[in-house]
Image: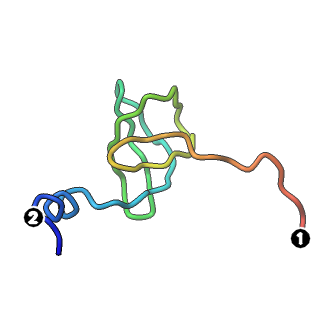
Amino acid sequence: MTFALNELTRLLAPDQTLVGSVTGIEGVMVRVATAQGAVMARTLDALSVGDRVRVKNGMAIRAPVARQSYPV
């Protein structure tokens, strides 16, 4: 059994994390291109166009990037 408020919160803002690339910056808002389309999100990090980010709950944070790659 779930509470109605929890169910409404889940419907309005699903818990999914999107990964994408910053395509534009407008103040504290960034436009992020993802596989599902472009989204606008707030950020506290100093980002630039081309940075990879994760978007969760409307906040964009810098995504970890591999520092080394090994040939296979």
Q: Is residue 28 left or right of residue 50?
A: left
Q: CA distance from mark 1 to mark 2?
A: 51 Å
Side of 1 relative to 62 (left or right): left
Q: Quadrant of residue 35?
A: bottom left
Q: Amino acid at mark 2?
A: Ala
- Residue at the spot 55% in from the left edge and 40% down from the top edge: 62
Judge by depth and name the residue closer to the eye, 15 or 4.
Answer: 4
Label 2 near label 1: C-beta < 8 Å?
A: no
Mark 2 residue element: helix
- Residue at the image position 35 percent from the left and 24 percent from the top: 27
Tell me, for residue 72, which label it has, or none. 1
Judged left or right of residue 21, residue 59 is left
Image x and y of residue 31, in percent: 38, 42
Question: At which x and y percent is residue 29?
Answer: 34, 33
Residue at image position (51%, 48%) is 21
Q: Is residue 10 left or right of residue 44?
A: left
Quadrant location of the C terminus in the rendered image: bottom right
Frontmost residue, 17 versus 23: 17
Q: Which residue is mark 2?
A: 4
- Amino acid at the residue labelled 1: Val
- Looking at the picture, does residue 8 appear above or below residue 62? below
Label 1: element kind: loop
Comes first in the chain, label 1 or label 2? 2
Q: Quadrant of residue 7?
A: bottom left
54 shown above or below 7: above
Figure quadrant of the N terminus: bottom left
